[in-house]
Image (cartoon, rainbow, N blue to C red):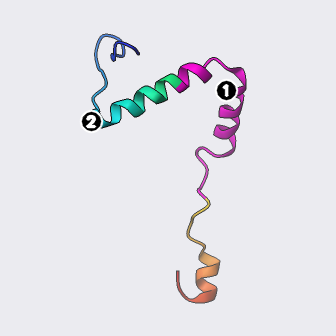
Amino acid sequence: MSSGYFGKFGGQFVPEMLRPALEELEAAFQQCGQDPVFWEGFRRELSQYSGRPTPLYFAANLSAHYGRA
């Protein structure tokens, strides 16, 4: 991504003040993106967390018990 483009079209269209953070993120990914341990942890997080309800949800039984949300 050193050219700032993804294939023939596109690019990095972000505010200039965010560019250093994106460069830092890219460097970190380049460092850990080849590490099998990183991908193992990433896949574990996807299987256990991603796409599941968050810990914060409407607790209907508690709301009914206390008469409010």
Image: magenta residue range: 28-54
**Are the residues at dot 1 and dot 2 in contact (C-beta closer than 8 Å)?**
no
Q: Type of residue at label 1? A: Trp
In the displayed structure, 24 sits above or below 62; it is above
Q: Give coordinates of residue 26: x percent, y percent.
A: 47, 24
Q: Quadrant of residue 10?
A: top left
In the displayed structure, 45 sits above or below 34; it is below
Q: Which element carries disc 2, helix, strand or loop?
A: loop
Residue 39's tag is 1
Q: Which element carries disc 1, helix, strand or loop?
A: helix
Residue 15's tag is 2
Q: Give coordinates of residue 36: x percent, y percent.
A: 71, 21
The front one of 43 and 27 is: 27
Q: Please indicate whether residue 18 sits to the left or right of residue 64 in the image.
A: left
The front one of 25 and 55 is: 25
The front one of 26 and 49 is: 26
Say whether disc 1 or disc 2 marks the residue closer to the N-terminus.
2
Circle 2: is it few (<14), some (14-19), or many (20+) Cα within 10 Å?
Answer: few
Residue lying furthest bottom: 67
